[in-house]
Image: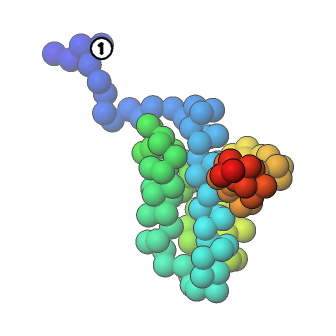
Amino acid sequence: MAQSTDPRPAVGQGVTGEHESRAAVVLAGVAGELATKDPEVVVDPTDFPIMVGIHAARTGITSGQNVSRLALRTVGAVPVGVSREVFAVQVAQGAQALGYDWSADDNRRVIPTIPAPRPEQRAEVSR
């Protein structure tokens, strides 16, 4: 006899606000990759779910399956013959629909820096 505390695999867990925000971050990353890497190439419909899964794994998301499903459901199917650049717009709109704040990207560094002494400081150190 089933107990009330037994897991019920047929009953899915609900989507939380955390899932939505993490799916938005994943979609924003995928949109950036689609727009910058070979933007004129046609999207293979099997590539998009793989990209979503990879981005979810990179961000260290523990509930990756729920986040990936939400991200894929938000964007929908990949249109036939669409370029990566055009599809990136659809993916970015999905990220925005989930609440991604694009203005937060305005203040991030474009070129990462590695802390190191300035040339004039090196000359003083070597004396």
- Judge from the rendering whether residue 17 lies leftward or rightward of residue 4; answer left or right: right
On screen, residue 106 above or below 16: below
Q: Residue at x 72, y 68 (%)?
A: 89
Q: Residue at x 60, y 76 (%)?
A: 37
On screen, residue 122 above or below 30: above
Q: Which residue is mark 1?
A: 5
The percent position of residue 26, horizontal first and vertical second, equals 58, 52
Q: Residue at x 38, y 32 (%)?
A: 11
Q: Rate crowding at label 1 as few (under 14), some (14 to 19) or many (20 or more) other CA atoms within 10 Å.
A: few
Quadrant of the frame with the N terminus = top left
Foreground residue, 6 or 110? 110
Q: What amino acid type is highlighted by mark number 1?
A: Thr
The percent position of residue 108, horizontal first and vertical second, equals 76, 51
Whether residue 97 is visible to the viewer of this picture, yes or no, is no
Q: Residue furthest front?
A: 127
On screen, residue 59 above or below 15: below
The percent position of residue 40, horizontal first and vertical second, equals 64, 86
The percent position of residue 61, horizontal first and vertical second, equals 48, 41
Foreground residue, 60 or 78? 60
Whether residue 98 is visible to the viewer of this picture, yes or no, is yes
Foreground residue, 116 or 5? 116
